[in-house]
């Protein structure tokens, strides 16, 4: 028997079942150069494989919207032209695909945003499909599993995961991947407990794959080859857990009200309309953070006003009471594949977020105009990120007023009373919170960056990861300061960082008087439960 502990998980569920060790096939391309007269035939061979991949993805997209995003990637101009360009450089089609996918994956993996890092996995999935078609091989089919198992793999792609039958696949463990990956999202939607990033799990099972395995996804616990006593313990825990899930889901009909009668707003963090749609069964109040940068990152060009308007309109029509759109938050650690940023010694302290928007006014105005136009379809709020001075907030608000004036002249409708608020995520904004509260309609605390800046800890640096702590006294004191400042001026204070969904943090935040919790969909039911209990 061996026990493994996993630190980070957003999945829940308890499983005891035999191991199914999944090994992907080798799709490594031959690296031989082609002759000039072979260039056009290789391009045609790639185009044929692309057509087949797109046909498959269209069929999958009918059943699951995640594959709509995959379809966009497969047809993306940047990807297709990248492959064709490399074939022109005398790479064979397989090598051209492999190199292009590798470059795009590197761009997304370098972005210090968990969601965008995981989009790199989606790009690799498309590459895998292309290579399989080019090589004429059939990818392993996990849909053939017909017995209760825990699937253990180096990594899974969405196209693998969607084939899993929850009746037989009781759990998933992977060496790689992240909690915000489409694989994690799919598994959670299918009610399959999943633990990702479990280093070394494949080598632990390589010698003997005919083992039982137990996992508690919520606690991040894995037991390989459990004793009979341990197996019985997990079977009993599983029964208790399933009953608790049924009980928690019945709470969805209850408004999130604390024991002393305060109505808390419970919202979801979203990156696209699909995320909003998926959260609706959990009876959300709305979207406390709509990450508009994802609209930009998933394009091969700066999205136009009209393109953004259609996305925001769709999201607000789905959102029950509130759609809070964070204006473009890129730069430094969040790049765009079609825009070259100058290299910076310290990108976290560099040209990013509102600093970019105030300088690139035409780009910023296109976004603000799109948001304003979408506000006629529901309650939309505008939220500015990375504000450190009153001058920045005032300039941003002036641009909003300028866009309003233009839309009036063009006789285009918008909500005249639309609220404009700001993220509090820097030490400067904490110290100036009282002054900001006089000029902002609401605050949202971004604890991810705030913790990093307050503690001088790079959250992406594994050597000091243990020092990155929401519960550090400085962070807790800053949060309390922000809430008091907002309430003194009568404005709502919410939180959209990871801290808002931490079960240990929720009671503390309620005592401090936080008005709104905006969390990932996986944490909505549990956050509601904690609110009702406090």
Image (cartoon, rainbow, N blue to C red):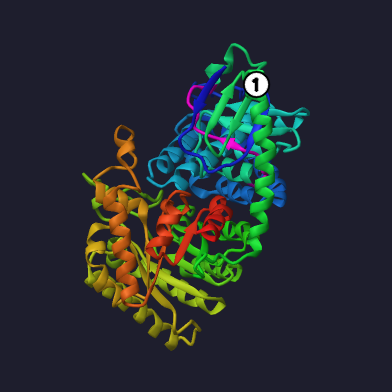
At 30% from the left and 73% from the top, the residue drawn is 437
Q: Is residue 120 left or right of residue 345?
A: right
Q: Is residue 42 left or right of residue 426?
A: right
Name the foreground residue: 349 vs 57: 349
At 42% from the left and 88% from the top, the residue drawn is 409
Q: Position of residue 471 (x, y in %)?
A: 34, 48
Looking at the image, is 39 positioned above or below residue 120?
above
Looking at the image, is 18 positioned above or below residue 527?
above
Q: Mark 1 points at which residue?
A: 229
User: Taking the image as drawn, is residue 160 in sight?
Assistant: no
Q: Which quadrant of the structure image shows residue 397?
A: bottom left
Range of residues picked out in magenta:
189-201
Looking at the image, is 77 positioned above or below residue 280?
above
- Disc 1 crowd, CA 10 A, few/some/many (<14, 14-19, 20+): few
Q: Position of residue 349 (x, y in %)?
A: 24, 52
Query: Residue pushed farthest right?
Result: 146
| 391 part of magenta stretch | no
């Amino acid at each position: 028997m061996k026990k493994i502990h996993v630190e980070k998980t957003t999945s829940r569920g308890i499983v005891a079942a035999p191991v199914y060790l999944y090994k992907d096939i080798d799709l490594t391309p031959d690296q031989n150069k082609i002759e000039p007269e072979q260039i056009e035939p290789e391009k045609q061979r790639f185009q044929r494989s692309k057509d087949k991949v797109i046909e498959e993805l269209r069929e999958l997209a009918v059943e699951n919207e995640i594959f709509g995003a995959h379809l966009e990637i497969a047809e993306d101009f940047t990807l297709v032209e990248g492959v064709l360009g490399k074939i022109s450089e005398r790479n064979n089609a397989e090598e051209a695909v492999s190199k292009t996918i590798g470059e795009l994956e590197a761009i997304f993996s370098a972005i210090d945003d968990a969601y965008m890092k995981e989009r790199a996995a989606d790009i690799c999935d498309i590459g895998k499909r292309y290579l399989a078609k080019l090589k004429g091989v059939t990818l392993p089919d996990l849909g053939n599993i017909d017995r209760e198992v825990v699937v253990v793999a180096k990594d899974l792609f969405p196209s693998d995961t969607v084939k899993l039958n929850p009746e037989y696949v009781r759990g998933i463990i992977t060496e790689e991947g992240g909690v915000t990956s489409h694989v994690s999202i799919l598994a959670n939607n299918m009610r399959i407990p999943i633990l990702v990033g479990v280093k070394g799990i494949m080598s632990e099972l390589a010698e003997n794959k005919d083992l039982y395995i137990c996992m508690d996804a919520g606690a991040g616990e894995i037991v390989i080859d459990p004793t009979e006593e341990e197996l019985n313990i997990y079977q009993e825990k599983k029964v208790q857990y399933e009953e608790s899930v049924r009980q928690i889901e019945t709470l969805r009909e209850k408004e999130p009200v604390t024991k002393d009668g305060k109505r808390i707003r419970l919202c979801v963090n979203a990156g696209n309309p699909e995320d909003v749609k998926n959260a609706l069964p959990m009876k959300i109040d709305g979207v406390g953070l709509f990450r508009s940068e994802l609209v930009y990152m998933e394009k091969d060009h700066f999205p136009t006003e009209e393109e953004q308007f259609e996305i925001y309109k769709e999201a607000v029509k789905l959102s029950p009471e509130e759609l809070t759109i964070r204006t473009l938050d890129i730069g430094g650690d969040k790049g765009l594949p079609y825009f070259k940023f100058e290299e910076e010694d310290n990108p976290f302290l560099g040209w990013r977020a509102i600093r970019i928007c105030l300088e690139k006014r035409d780009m910023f105005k296109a976004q603000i105009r799109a948001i304003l136009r979408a506000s006629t379809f529901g309650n939309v709020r505008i939220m500015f990120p990375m504000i450190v001075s009153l001058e920045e907030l005032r300039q941003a608000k002036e641009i909003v007023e300028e866009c309003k004036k233009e839309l009036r002249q063009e006789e285009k409708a918008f909500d005249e009373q639309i609220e404009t608020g700001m993220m509090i995520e820097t030490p400067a904004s904490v110290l100036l919170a009282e002054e900001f509260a006089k000029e902002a309609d609401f605050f949202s605390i971004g604890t991810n960056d705030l913790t990093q800046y307050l503690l001088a800890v790079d959250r992406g640096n594994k050597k000091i990861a243990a020092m990155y702590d929401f519960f550090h006294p400085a962070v807790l004191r800053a949060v309390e300061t922000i809430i008091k400042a907002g309430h003194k001026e009568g404005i709502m204070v919410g939180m959209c960082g990871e801290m808002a969904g931490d079960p240990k943090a929720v009671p503390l935040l309620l005592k401090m008087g936080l008005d709104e919790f905006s969390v990932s969909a996986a944490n909505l039911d549990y956050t509601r439960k904690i609110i009702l209990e406090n």
